Image (tube, coloured by chain):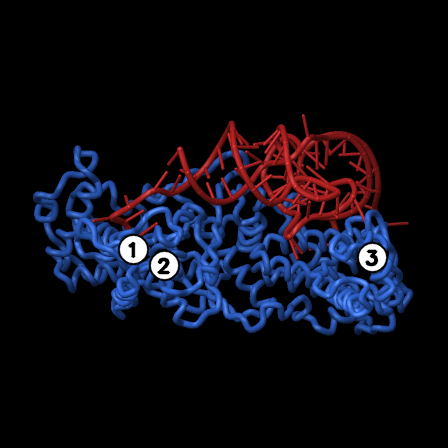
Amino acid sequence: MKQHLQTLFTHAIAQLKANGDIPQDIIDDIRLERTRNTEHGDFACNIAMILAKKGHKRPRDLALLIIEQLPTDDAIAKVEIAGPGFINVFLTPFAYHALIDNILTTKETYGRSQIGAGQSIMIEFVSANPTGPLHVGHGRGAAYGAALANLLKAVGSKVHKEYYVNDAGRQMDILATSVWLRYLELCGESLTFPSNGYQGDYIWDIAADLHRHYAEDLQQSTKTVFENISPDANQGGDKELHIDALIKRSQELLGEKSYQLIFQKGLEIILENIRSDLEQFGVTYDEWFAESSLNTNHTIAKTIEQLKAAGHTYEQNGALWFRSSAFGDEKDRVVIRENGQFTYFASDMAYHLNKLERGFDHLINIWGADHHGYVPRIKAVMTALGASAHRLTVLLVQFATLYRGKERLQMSTRSGEFVTLRELREEVGRDAARFFYIQRKSEQHLNFDLELAKSQSNDNPVYYIQYAYARICSVFRHEKNKVWSHNKATLKQLGNPHEQALMVTLSRYPEVIEMAAHAYEPHQLTYYLRDLAQDFHTFYDSHKILIDDNELRQARLSLIAACQQVLRNGLTIIGVSAPEVM
RNA sequence: GCGCCCGUAGCUCAGAUGGAUAGAGCGUUGGCCUCCGGAGCCAAAGGUCACAGGUUCGACUCCUGUCGGGCGCGCCA
C-alpha cells in the first residue's frame, strides 16, 4: 500500500522535473507516513516541504503542483494539502477490500518482501562458553537472535545462524579440572574444592557420569594432587595461580589421553545440554562452529601471519602485539602471549576472518552489553585485513534482571546460584519467555517479572494476543456446519469504523516487518501484534460475526480470517505459538 | 579518568530515516455478558519527554555541555 503510493509520488515528481517546474538535480527521497490523526487521511507526505527550499517555491504551491501530476488511482479517494504543506492521502474502501483479498490469497507469505533479497547474512548469537548451563541472561540473546533471523528471512535475505563454541582455552581447562576433582570426591577422596573452580551441581552430574563409566580408573590420591600446589585465595594465596597449578597437575597426573577424556566428556555433556535447551526454546542453528577447529586448521597462525605481513604487528616484552590503535581502537592488543599461547582475541580474529572467507555479505554478532569494549578491536582487525568494518554489525543486548513480583532475583554463575534458562522456561512457559525477552528494545535493560509472565490475565500481552487468535478459531468452529469460503465480492460490505480500523492495522503489517528488519528491532512486531489483537477484540465485542445476513457474515469471516492469518504470521516470526484453543 | 548504553505518565515501556494535538499496558476511578470464548470491551484521570544551550519553517528525535543510572576499560575468556 505504502509502496504503491510511493510509486505514484515518484511518478509525479519525475513529471515536474520533466516540465522544468523543479530542478533536475534535486533529491527526491519520497517518504510517506501513516497519519496519527484520521482527519489527516491515511497517509501523509512531506515531500513538498523538503523540496520547497531547493525548488525555490512555497511548500503549499509545490504541493499543489505535485497533486496535479499525481496519477489517478482507484485506491485513492482524495488528496488534500494541509498545514505547512503536508499532502494528505485518503484511501478508498476498495483499497482495503483488495487488501483482505490479498492476505487471504498470499497467506503465510503476506508481509514478506524482497528488500533484503540477494543478501546473505550470517548471524551469530548466544555462543555461551560450554562451561555450564545457559542462564536467563543467555535467553535474551537466544530469543532476540532467533526472532531477528526470522525477520531477515521475511524480507528475503539468506540467513545463516551460527553458534560459536568456545571449546578451547583456559576456561575449558578449569572445567575439566573441576570435573575431575568432583570425580575424586565421588571416589571417596576428601579435598578442598578450589574457589575459582566451577561450583554448580552440574559438575557433580558430569563427574558421576564419569564415575559410572570408569569407576575408580582415573583416581589419584588427594595428597598427590595437591602436593606443593600454590595456595588458594582463602589460604592467603591467589585463586588464579591455584587453579592454574591444579590444571597443570591434573594434566601431568592423568596424561594427555585421560585428561582429554575428561575434558571431552565435560564438553560433550554441557554442549548437548545447551543444544537441547535451545531446541526446546525453539531456537535452532545452521551450524555449531568449534573454536578448536581454528587451531587444528592453523587458521589462527595464518591470520597472524597475514597481519604480520601487512606490517600491523610488533613485538614488545616478549609478546606479539596487533597495532589496533591504528584502526580506531583505544590501545594495541596482544595476540601471542609471552608464554607463546594465543590470546582469546587471536582466535576471535581468526574466526571473523573465517566468516568473511565463507562469503557472507554481512555479519551480525549478538553480544551481551558487557562485551561492548570489544567491538572496536574486532572491527580494527577487519579493517587491517582489508575488509570493510561495515560488513560487521555488533548488536549489544543489555542485561535481563529477573524479578518475582517486587523481589529481585540474584544471579551468579560461579556460585552456581543462577537461574537457568531451562528453569525459566519450565516456570513461565516457552511462549511467555520468548515474548517477554523480545518485547523490549535490545539496548534497553529488561526487567523480567516471572509472576507477570506466568499470569494468565489481562496484564499479560502474550495471552492477550494468543486469545485473539483462539477466539477467531472458535468462531470458525461454530461456523463449521455452514459453508464459508472467501468470496471477494462480499467484501464491499465491510466499512464500519471498527472494521475499518482493523483493516488499516492489517495493512500496516508489511511496513512493520520491513521496519523491524531494517532496524534489527523485533520488539516492533510485539507492539504491532498487540495493536492488532486489540483492534480485533474491539471489533469482536461490538459486532456479531455469525449473523443471518449472508453476505455480511461472509465478509466478516473473511476479515477475521485475514486477521487470523496475520496474527499467525507475526507470532511465527517472534517464535510464539498460535494456539487454536487455550 | 576515558569509552559505550540508558533517562518519556505513579510503575513497566513504545515513539526508524527531524513533522501536525507525545502514545500503549499495568495501576487508580466508573461503566459493559439473554449474544460467536469476560484471558474480553468502553470511558475518565494522569506529562516541564532529566536539565541548559544550539542547529531550522519545525526537535522526544540531530549537535554541545551538565546531572543521574547501568556496563566496560587484562599477556581472563
Residue that appears at 12% across and 60% down:
A255
Give the mark toward the camera: 1 or 3: 3
Q: Chain of mark 2?
A: A
Residue indicated by mark 1 = A322
Q: Quadrant of the N terminus of chain A?
A: bottom right
Residue drawn at 85 percent across, 61 percent down: A65
Disc 3: CA contacts within 10 A as few (<14), some (14-19) or many (>=20): many
Looking at the rendered image, the quarter that the C terminus of chain A falls into is: bottom right
Q: Give the numbered dot on residue A381.
A: 2
x, y percent for residue A104: 74, 71
Q: Nearer the viewer, residue A246 or B28?
A: A246
- Amino acid type, mark 1: Phe
Q: Is residue A114 above or below residue A266?
A: below
Q: Which residue is mark 3?
A: A62
What number is the disc on residue A112? Answer: none
Q: Earlier in the sequence, mark 1 or mark 2?
A: 1
Same-subunit check for callouts 1 and 3: yes
Amino acid type at image mark 2: Val
Is residue A477 among what the camera can see?
A: no
Q: Amino acid at mark 3?
A: Leu
Marks 3 and 2 sit apart, C-alpha to C-alpha, by 50 Å
Chain red in the figure, letter? B
- The chain that hosts pointer 3 is A
- Return the x and y of residue A18 as percentages of the image width and height: 79, 70
